[in-house]
Amino acid sequence: MYASRPLLVLALCLIGCDSAPPAVDGGGMDAAIADSGSDAGVDAGPPWSGPGCNPTDGIECDGDWTDRCDPGCAATECCAPVGGSFSCVARTEDGACPAANIWVDADRIADAVEWRYFPEDDCAIAEGCVAAPGWRRLLRFSTWTPNTGDADLFLGVPDDSVPYFVYSECHMHYHFNGYAEYELRAGDGSVAATGHKQAFCLLDFYRYPEEDERGVVYDCDNQGIQTGFQDVYGSDLDCQWVDVTDVTPGDYTLHIELNTAHALLESNYDDNSTDVTVTIPEDVVMDVTAPCDRPRTGPDRDCGWTRESMRTCTPGATMTVGCSAACGAGLCTGDTVMRICPTDDPTECNARDAIAVNDESGCTDADSCSQTVFTCPDSGSYVVLTGHYDTAFPDSTCTVAAFSSGP
Ligand SMILES: [Ca+2]
Ligand SMILES: [Ca+2]
Ligand SMILES: [Zn+2]
């Protein structure tokens, strides 16, 4: 798998978190000194506890800190999140509070089309990420979002009382539904398909644009993206796709838009949309042992597999095949994937032909080795394919073991 991204959530500063002039409350969306105006929901945001100025009841950056921050900031300053804590920082020349600025790194999108099977109880169905159970054809891609603004993108601690947190019963964690919206647009501008990414844990994933000495500040328990860091939603994540099952092959524009409702405070919303040209290829049969035309991840791809062996079994028997020491059968190094095929023809083991497929064995939480269980086909034989989880890092090994566990 990709880097792990634990649970949870976020929230935030709505319209009005902006440029209101200093001192006396009364600017912008704030109706009253007691901050009972239309940004009351914002003020009900996640509590901040830490050094520096302290918005006692949530995020305050719209000029009414005098009653809310302890200690407060001078009229020429804002109480803003920088480096993981709220501090009194100078206003910008036009009187605005320093703010985050996120955008999509178009060079990192790395789109690819592949099929994936969704059982009826898959969370992706409950979450509206695919139109129906069964085999779905997906345009998968990655969304890397650097924060190059003058302050942190601050989300904070997940809390039921915050309206921006939407709890997912299926995933058992909070989502922030407005983080990214996806549209596949045809040449005439019409929308061919849509998708959406529920952010579930915005954090400091990598520095941007390059390494420096600063450490990670934001994580799943206190969410945000520091200025000079970026978050990453890899193409292997649930819902990080557009369902193109019913889309006619051809060239399209993938339109990605961040922070669609401006629920997260930014200094610039004009750079939140990105358009890239993508091709939905004809659904042709692939030789799964051929190299991939670009780096690909996961067990759903139809390229970059290695034929490990052809083996025999007793038709109808329950077979276990794997290379996971954690499971007690076989051995692997690195991060493997495995696919079981019905025949020795590599063009007859595209995703939808496979008997079984696996990424992580599940035998221990940390096991990135693979193991599958399947019923021996009538032919009495099967072919084992192994692969690297990420074809850009072809450094895994998979020593396969197989056994029958009945009947
Ligand atoms: Ca932006
Ligand atoms: Ca794996
Ligand atoms: Zn989720």
Image: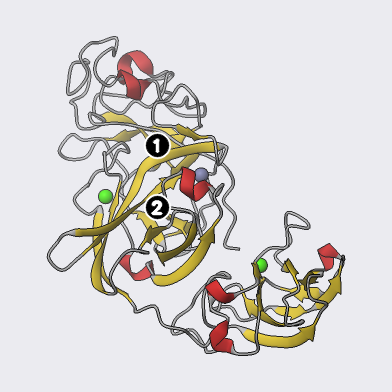
Q: Secondary structure at mark 1?
A: strand
Task: Specify whether 97 is left or right of 197.
Answer: left
Q: Is residue 202 visible?
A: no
Residue toward you, 129 or 199: 129
Q: Where residue 337 appears, x then y in whole percent?
A: 65, 72
Quadrant location of the N terminus in the rendered image: bottom right
Residue toward you, 87 or 110: 110
Q: Where residue 390 appears, x then y in whole percent?
A: 57, 74
Instruction: Work out which residue is located at the far front of the displayed protein and give it.
Output: 378
- Residue type indicated by callout 2: Ala
Residue toward you, 376 or 15: 376
34 over 5 or under it: above or below: above
> Residue at coordinates 18% horizontally, 51% vertically from top-left?
270
Reading the chain from its start, which is encountered first: label 2 or label 1? 1
Q: Which residue is mark 1?
A: 81
> Residue at coordinates 51% horizontally, 79% vertically from top-left?
302
> Residue at coordinates 47% horizontally, 48% vertically from top-left?
125
Q: Which residue is mark 2?
A: 131
Q: CA distance from mark 2 to mark 1?
A: 39 Å
Instruction: Work out which residue is located at the far left of the displayed protein and give it.
Output: 188
Quadrant location of the C terminus in the rendered image: bottom right
> Residue at coordinates 68% horizontally, 78% vertically from top-left?
396
Task: Specify whether 146 is left or right of 172.
Answer: left
Task: Specify whether 303 is left or right of 380.
Answer: left
406 over 151 or under it: above or below: below
Q: In terms of image quadrants, where is residue 92?
A: top left
75 over 284 or under it: above or below: above
